[in-house]
Image (tube, helix red, strand yellow):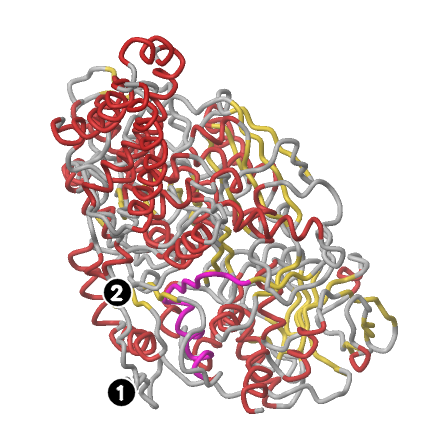
Amino acid sequence: MAIAYVAFTFVFNFFYPIGFMGGNFLYTAEVAPARLRAAISSIATANHWLWNLVVVLVTPVAVDTIEYWYYVMYALISATIPVCVYIFYPETMNRSLERLDQVFVDAPSIWNIVPMARDLPQGQVGDEASSADKHEKADAASEVEMRIRLNAMWGFSGGQLIGLAVGCLRKSPSRPIQGTNESTGIRKVLYSHLDDTFEERIERGTSQLKLRPLRIACQDATAQMALIQFMSAGMESAAVPTTVHCDHLIVSRDGEAEDLPRALETHKEVYEFMESACQKYNMGFWKPGAGIIHQIVLENYAIPGGMMIGTDSHTPNAGGLGMIAIGVGGADAVDVMAGLPLELKAPKVLGVRLTGELSRWTSPKDIISAVAGINSVQGGTGSIIEYFGPGAKSLSATGMATVCNMGAETGATTSIFPYAPQMADYLRANRRHKMASAIESIAPELQADSGAEYDRVIEIDLSTLEPRINGPFTPDLSTPLSQFGAAVKENKWPEELTAGLIGSCTNSSFEDMGRAASLAQQALDAGLKPKMPLLVSPGSLQTRETLDEAGILPVFERLGAVMLPNACGPCCGSWDRVDMPKGTPNSIITSYNRNFSGRLDSNPATNIFLTSPEVVMAKVFSSDLAFDPSVDSLTTPTGEEFRFQQPSGDTLPKNGYLDSDVAYKSPPTDRSHVEVKINPSSERLQRLAPFEPWSGEDFKDCLILIKTKGKCTTDHITPAGPWFRYRGHLENISNNTLIGAVNAENDKVNTVRNQISQEDGDVPGTARDYKAHGKPWVVIADHNYGEGSSREHAALQPRYLGGKAIIAKSFARIHESNLKKQGMLALTFANESDYDRIRSSDRISILGLADLKPGQPLTLSVNEEWEAELNHTFTPEQIEYFKAGSALNMMAKQQSK
């Protein structure tokens, strides 16, 4: 008996590790069938539970009593319990394998397995293919997942992908991290995407980083010119996974049933061009009606720890999933498409510490509304906003996306949240199970280290935060809801509310719509109807169909809301508003992100207010702008007093999101036969001719086209709305150049004195006249010139019309970069008071261009009577753009070598 006991013990302990490791190999290599893999995983997990239980309590007694039969029973129990759970308990059937495995890991005891499994969403075990996998989208998620798996096979943990990159930066003598403790989450992620050739010392606010984004996303209004520029570069394929999204051109007016077919007909030429270009250059194409670019990116491509760029200023939306997502101009996107790194000044980090939890009427929108009010529209320039603290962990993934999205209104480079389990929940709800599991393995590296230091910290207590309304005319004028009524009277804003709009890339998630619908249902039950037009635009086809399945869309329809297409619509100016004559002062309330003069309906007299979808929904039942739905009452048709109860709704659909990949078209394997469709006689599309390179001489005796006063956004420089139709035709769209800018000389828009004819005229016409006479010209501007949209047309058009420089008090980041890419000088006054000394009739010269170097000022000569110093932020490479005439010229020159 003793010999048998020893022999059995030897055999068991020899073969058990082999079997254990072999089973794990089958599991990780995905060789075994899904159900067997599930059993293997649960056996391994059960061993951990039983070891703690059996070894400590049972083993001493059991070995003395039943001898080697103890080991037999141990093995049987280890295998039987989890296998029986899988086979006999229906709660564990039809669930995601990864999520079910996580239940075995997280369950405090075996008795908690079934209740925890019961709460999982449905999804066949082993059916982990994401939407991207189904259509072979070579997306960033697949790339990162592949890196994680490959590194794991070679003995690296997933977290080491980011951890090793940051560790190298901390230890390398050639690239030490300068300044405060670099353990914030954003720095760890950002620096892990540095180009391999980058060897400089990193100093925040000074160093020019070279980064390698994993993905590019382009919306249709900016994609037209980006694709035309890429075609000029002579490349055969985009070097980085790229998608084009048709969301800006669809004009909202009558509802989806009429608006979408009208857009397909009106913009047929442009859609065919973009689709054919995507097919030719190996890019993904999301068709009209698929949804807003940022919603689609969040659903399909955003990944914690990843990095992407997008040709839209609200690209930071993906920060809600812990991704670095930066809005850029089309020329920057073209560089990355061509395989060049993205250049970005090493940002400072503005920390926003969140404590407490949101309650009652307060929503994630109120967080960023408060931050915008604290920070202003330019307070975030040169910084990335990183949210942290216990309150950050209480928000949903789409709520975090809302906060990051509107961070663009502070001038911040981007915004980001640290990893939270809600992000994995969102990924799984979108059928991205593999990515969720891969990201969970590197979760610690996607968060700030203990004791992380920030360049500045803002503290916000979510428990005391109240709903806010921002505006009008600027997104940083933030007023608490309780004080808004008094502000209406004090500022004499139009007191009658004339429209309510819910949607946009900022607030069109399942959670947003569900909470708004809960208030709508309360009103319906009370017999109330909206006092004004209510326009609702779901963010994507996927979200729209999921909302319909959940019974949420029918609530809006019963309310009489106009259901707009899955597109930007009014938010980007694509709104054909027919109920309000232009020039009529009025107030509207929206859940959008931007409210510049004339932004939504091309009416400069419209006062646009920004707030959460919940507040918008409640306020449409009263025409009084000052109505506070959290405390004020309404009268029902029966004469009863009615007060809204606080909104409610699920953060994610119980059964996950429906599939909407029917709206996606992938490029063909063989692209040799594809021809890009551009009609040479088109009024909407035009191939680019190269700009003239720098002559080598100083710019002398330049005219001043206009001296702008106050806010001059890209909407003022090149308005949207009906001008969207010319976004692919530089000559035609140049006819709207600076028509919204206020002339400091006469306080008028689109009226300037022609210094040649001495007659007043429109701005673009005057610029064309100067160009025809061979007269160079400049623009003198105020603070934060070019804030707002990423549209590079605001730089292309002045360059095309003969402009040489923009001289401002300060610039918005994206626009400054766009100007440099097009070979224009972006210069700032060393002494801002010099702005006040200049008159539109002055003649100026810019001296010292032959010695243009980083950090070396230039000289401004005014009428050869006085001089001023001009600063700039040109890097050596950007100086070469200027000399070549544009970044595209330099790229084409390099391609020809």
- Tell whether position 141 is magenta: no
Please indicate, yes or no, whether residue 598 appears anywhere in the rendered image.
no
Q: In this rendered view, identify the residue nearer to me: 182 or 318.
A: 182
Dot 2, crowdedness within 10 Å: few (<14), some or many (≥20)? some
Disc 2 residue type (three-letter): Lys
- Identify the residue at image location x=37%, y=54%: 301
Q: In this rendered view, identify the residue nearer to me: 651 or 637.
A: 651
Disc 1 residue type (three-letter): His
Q: Which mark is residue 287?
A: 2
Q: Which residue is mark 1?
A: 673
Q: Give me the C-alpha separation between circle 1 and circle 2.
A: 22 Å
Q: Position of residue 670 (x, y in %)?
A: 27, 81
Where on the picture, by quarter, is residue 813?
bottom right
Dominant secondary-structure state across the stretch colored magenta: helix
Give the structural element (helix, strand or loop) at label 1.
loop
Q: Position of residue 730 (x, y in %)?
A: 46, 79
Q: Vertically, is 127 above or below 529?
A: below
Classify the position of the C terminus by image quarter: bottom right
Q: Is residue 372 left or right of residue 229?
A: right
Please indicate, yes or no, whether residue 540 appears anywhere in the rendered image.
yes
Mark 1 and mark 2 lie on one chain; the one further toward the N terminus is: 2
- Tell whether position 225 is magenta: yes
Q: Position of residue 68 (x, y in %)?
A: 28, 20
Q: Vertically, is 208 above or below 29?
A: below
Q: Which residues are magenta?
A: 212-231
Classify the position of the N terminus by image quarter: top left
